[in-house]
Amino acid sequence: MNHPPQPFRLLPGATTSPVILHVPHSSRAVPGSVRSGIVLDDRALEQELDHITDSHTAEIAAAAAAGSALTPWQFVNGLSRLVIDPERFPDEREEMLAVGMGAVYSHTTHRERLRPDGFDGRPLIDRYFHPYADAMTRAVQDRLEAVGRAVIIDVHSYPTEPLPYELHGGGPRPPICLGTDPFHTPAALLAAAGTAFAGFGGTGLDSPFAGTYVPLEHYGKDERVGALMVEIRRDVYMSEPGGPAGPGLPALAAALAELVDGVLP
C-alpha cells in the first residue's frame, strides 16, 4: 500500500542545542490530490521538479547533523514546494507574487502556467502552509524555552544559470550565497558561516537570493532567534538539473557541521 508522504518532520537533536537546520525545498513529493490541480503533463512536471527542487539538501543537512559535536535539530519539508512554499509570505507582502510564485505557485520557473487561471490556493494554505508554520514556530519556541535562544540555518541550493522566474538573477552567483536578515542575522553567525564555507571558491551575501526564514510569530520581534540562509550553487555538489549528487556533498556537509559547531556557546 502506498502511504501519502509526511508533510514535514522534526528530527530531534541534542536537548542543549539551539540550532535548527531547516530544509524546506528538498522534496519532489506531490500528493495525488494536489497533482490533480496542476496542468503540466507528467514529463513536464518532472522537468519542473528538476529545476525547482533543492535536490540533496536534506542529505547535506542529515550528514552535517551526524558530524556535529552537538547534534542540531532538523526540520525537513516532506513535500515539494509545488504543493506550498513554506518560506513565502502567505499574503501581499510576498514579492514573488509578481511571477506567480507566492505561497501557492500558479506559474513555473519558466513563467509557464502551473495551475489553471483562477485557481484558489486557499485550501492548500489551510491544509499545508499553516500546519507547517505552526510546527516550525513550536520548534523554535521549544529551543527558546530549553536553551534561551534559537538559531535557524536555512539549507538551500540554486542553479548555476539563472532561471526566468528569478527577480534578482542578474547579480553575482557565488558558490555559496549567504542570505541575511538585518534583525535576525548577528555578525558572529555570519562570520562563522564565512569561515566554515571558505573552501568552496567564495561566498557572497544576498545574491541571487536574499533573506532567511524566521517564523512570523518571532520575525522582527525576538532577537533571541538568529537565522541565516545557506544557498549552495548546485554545480558545487550535483549534476544539473535534478541529477545525482557528486563528491562535493560530503565536503559541504562537513562545512555545515563546522558552522553548526561554530554557533555553539
Image (spheres, grey):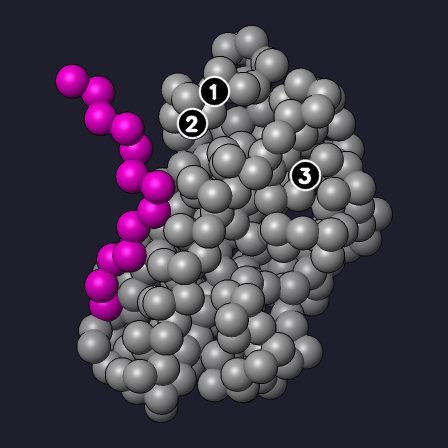
Residue located 59% across and 14% down the image:
40
> Front-most of 173 and 92?
92
Q: Residues within 10 Å of mark 2 (few under 14, many from 20)?
A: many
Residue type at the position of mark 3: Met
User: Pointer 1: what residue?
Assistant: 35
Disc number for residue 114: none
Residue 259 left/right relative to 118: left
Residue 69 x %, y %: 25, 75
> Front-most of 260 and 8?
8
Helix, strand or loop at mark 1: helix
User: Pointer 2: what residue?
Assistant: 30
Labels 2 and 1 touching (C-beta < 8 A): yes
- Check if residue 5 falls in the magenta segment: yes
Q: Residues within 10 Å of mark 1 (few under 14, many from 20)?
A: some
Residue located 69% across and 28% down the image:
107
Residue 214 left/right relative to 132: right
Examine the rendered structure and indicate whether residue 100 appears above or below residue 250: above
Rendered image quadrant of residue 264:
bottom left
User: Pointer 3: what residue?
Assistant: 101
In this rendering, the count of numbered labels is 3
